[in-house]
Image (cartoon, helix red, strand yellow):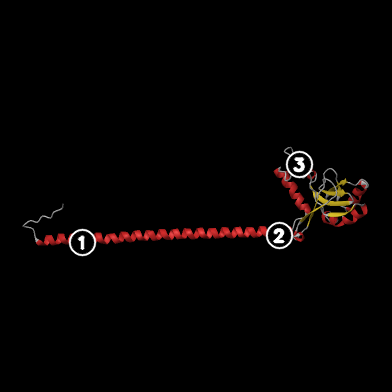
Amino acid sequence: MNKKITFSYSDSSDDEEDDDNDEASEEENQSEKPTKEGVNGGSNVEENADASKKDDQVHEAAKQSNNIETSVDKLIEAEIKELGDKSKRRFFKLDSGCNGVVLIQMRKRDGDPSPTEIVQHMMESASATKKHMSRFLLRVLPIEVSCYASDEEITKAIKPLIEQYFPANSETPAKFAVQYDARANSGIERMKIIDAVAKSVPEPHKVDLKNPEKTIIVQVVKTVCLIGVVEKYKELAKYNLRQLTSPQT
């Protein structure tokens, strides 16, 4: 469509310049094409690099998840083996021989909380959250000393417990009370046991039945006497879980 018209008075130099301009423009167009292709090629390389990085991250995440799963599986297997090994069990169920009474023996390790600390934490958490932790538990009491149910044996067995909770050289004397209960044993005298326990506590500690700071729990089950010391016994509804978790308290 574009025809070149030459006039008779035109110089040959103009034709040469036009030809040179046309050739130069063609060279520029040709030089622009590879640069565009080069730019497009660079973007493709960058996209491929990003994709490879994402793939590597996915593979690493998968490896980490697999490692976590295997470690959890190993922990579960080790725990199952430990539960199957009776020598490594921490809690044992003992037959009390009395309906409605369940005894759990605890194997204490270095650094573990005592039965009193465990039960105290249970009662305080139940009182704070108002959530009952079991359908069948009514009362949980800690036991730290057990012996034959007689005043003489109780006086001997309770000595280390008294030294721990009621030291004779204490600068802050504690007010205490004795809580006694007997099951499947009607031949033992209640006041005789209570007096034996109370007399074992040295001065300056005193008996206070209304507002005791510490309560000595004495539970007689058949011919066995179980003894423990608790705090806030009355404040925590005598360690009755149903009363603690009821909305009225």
- At mark 2, the secondary structure is helix
Residue type pointed to by label 1? Ala
The tally of labels here is 3
Q: Which residue is denoted by mark 2 in the rendering? A: 81
Q: Position of residue 206 (x, y in %)?
A: 86, 49
* Residue 9 percent location from the top left of the image: 6, 57
Image point 87% across, 49% down: which residue?
220
Of mark 2 and mark 3, the one earlier in the sequence is: 2
Which residue is at a point 61% across and 60% down the rendered structure image?
70
Residue type pointed to by label 2: Lys
Answer whether labels 2 and 3 touch (C-beta < 8 Å). no
Is residue 167 visible to us here? Answer: no
Q: Nearer the viewer, residue 100 or 7?
A: 100
Mark 3, residue position: 242
Q: Earlier in the sequence, mark 1 or mark 3?
A: 1
Q: Position of residue 84 (x, y in %)?
A: 73, 58
Report whether 118 appears left or right of 182: left
Tell me if 153 is positioned left or right of 54 in this view: right
In this rendering, does residue 196 appear at all? Answer: yes
Q: Outermost residue toward the top?
A: 248
Quadrant where the image shows the C terminus: top right
Decide: few, some or many residues near mark 2? Use Cα within 10 Å; few <14, some 14-19, many ≥20: few
Select label 1 or label 2 by which is in front. Answer: 2
- The Cα atoms of the two marked residues, 1 and 2, are separated by 86 Å
Residue 24 tag number: 1
